[in-house]
Amino acid sequence: MLPLTAVCLGVLAALLAWPVPAALARARWTRQDPLAALVCWQAVGLAGGLSIIGALLVHGLSPWGHSLPVAWWRWVTHWFSGAQPAEQAVRGDHWVAQTLAAVLALELLGVLVLSLVRTARTRARHRELLELLVGPATDVDARVLDSPVPAAFCIPGARPLLVLSSGMVEELDADQLAAVVAHERAHLRERHHLLLLPFVAWRAALPVLPAADRAHDAVRDLVEMRADDVALRALTGPTPRRTLAQAIVAAAEGGAPHGALAVNGGPLAQRVTRLLDPPAPLPRWARPAALTSAVALLLVPTALLLAPAVF
Amino acid sequence: MASLGDLERAVMERLWAAEEPVAATTLRDELAGDGTRAIALTTVHTVLTRLESKGFVRHDDARPRRFAARASREEHAAELMHEVLGQSADRQAVLARFIGSATAGEAAMLRALLADSTPTDTD
């Protein structure tokens, strides 16, 4: 059964493992609408996992029935009753596909859970240290950590902590500090750490897949751009774009190790260029189109998995 | 009554300021001295036990036991900054940093970008 379904899912998985993430990482429009791009990345990640595991599962269970739900049910019950043997001969490759599907599903989920736990533990440790070390800032709504290196960061969670180093406070003027704080608040409010987490986990789980690397870097840069966009709306000064760009440059200068190699481009340069010389907004239809594509990308493997057999 | 977190901070401040290990009774007296209300000795012990389990405080075997900070405030701050400024991808997920690490060359290039752009804002 379902040979065509398995093939379709396999082709989709191959597309999502390399050409689609490569194209999305290269696309220019993502800088104009980071939010829509982030939704697309989540869809690519989910649909990719669904289609590769689905392809293996559909093939592995094909001797048991004509659609995956039916085959799955018969496969589960045949262990207990033994009364419903497979409809067709079960060959070695069916068992291999089943095993691979199980291993892959367990690895992807396992690494995700593991990285959730490890992240939570590290955050708890940082929070303990910070609660003893930091004092409230005078001008802005943040805590200040005594350290000469300019740094700003936040620890997400139920009680988020927004921290500026004293070096950062000395380096920036009041408007620039407000821009930094607005940027970090945007991360916290939109839960950007949750958007990034699956890509961190899957990069660790699939080190052989170059797309996992690209996807992670692209998502990391997009959440920064998104936070910049949200921060701009909250800033009141006469030149908010320039203020935020100045804050980025000042922080980069203060924190740069001396004697390091020069780099052309890079995510920081992209962010600064985007702030100083904003790209023309996308046409009105672009965002709905991107979101529709993301939904379609998720619906295709789901439909293939649940639909009855295609011959 | 101050929260446990506030008390933990107050106790650590004392231990960081102290030259040598301090007994719990001394800590209680000192904490009562700058507050308006007295603090029970058991409360001080609770706070010290919590700080010990977090690895910030250790005690000696003298009788009565005396308590000291494991590391100075500066050492803890340096440890934290080291983690914050670390390169590993995991850190990116743990802490949302305002900017990732920049090299000296990159910082110079960013400065040039800023200088090249006209200071008039368009928005």
Image (cartoon, rainbow, N blue to C red):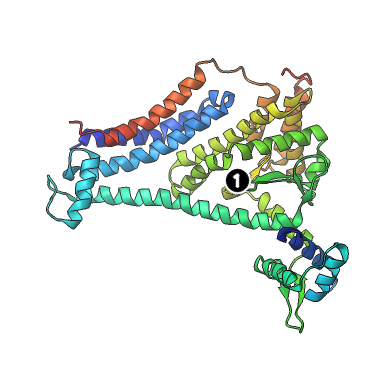
Quick check: A251 left or right of A18?
Answer: right
Label 1 environment density (alpha carbons within 10 Å; few <14, some 14–19, many ≥20):
many
The image shows residue A35, relative to residue A59, as above or below, that is: above
- Of all residues, the one furthest to the bottom in this rendering is B63
Instruction: State the residue position of label 1.
Output: B92
Quick check: A100 left or right of A75?
Answer: right
Secondary element under disc 1, as helix, strand or loop, is helix
| Amino acid at the residue labelled 1 | Gln
> Residue A53 placed where, x, y %?
33, 43
> Residue A92 placed where, x, y %?
19, 51
Q: Which residue corresponds to the image point at 62% horizontal and 37% vertical from the top-left?
A: A189
* Residue B6 visible in rendering: yes
Q: Which residue corresponds to the image point at 66% horizontal and 21% vertical from the top-left?
A: A278
- Of all residues, the one furthest to the right in this rendering is B33
Quick check: A213 left or right of A57?
Answer: right
Q: Which of the two residues, B88 or A208, is positioned nearer the viewer here?
A: B88
Image quadrant where one finds the C terminus of chain B: top right
How many marks are shown on the rendered structure? 1
> Residue A307 placed where, x, y %?
25, 33
User: Label 1 lies in what chain?
Assistant: B
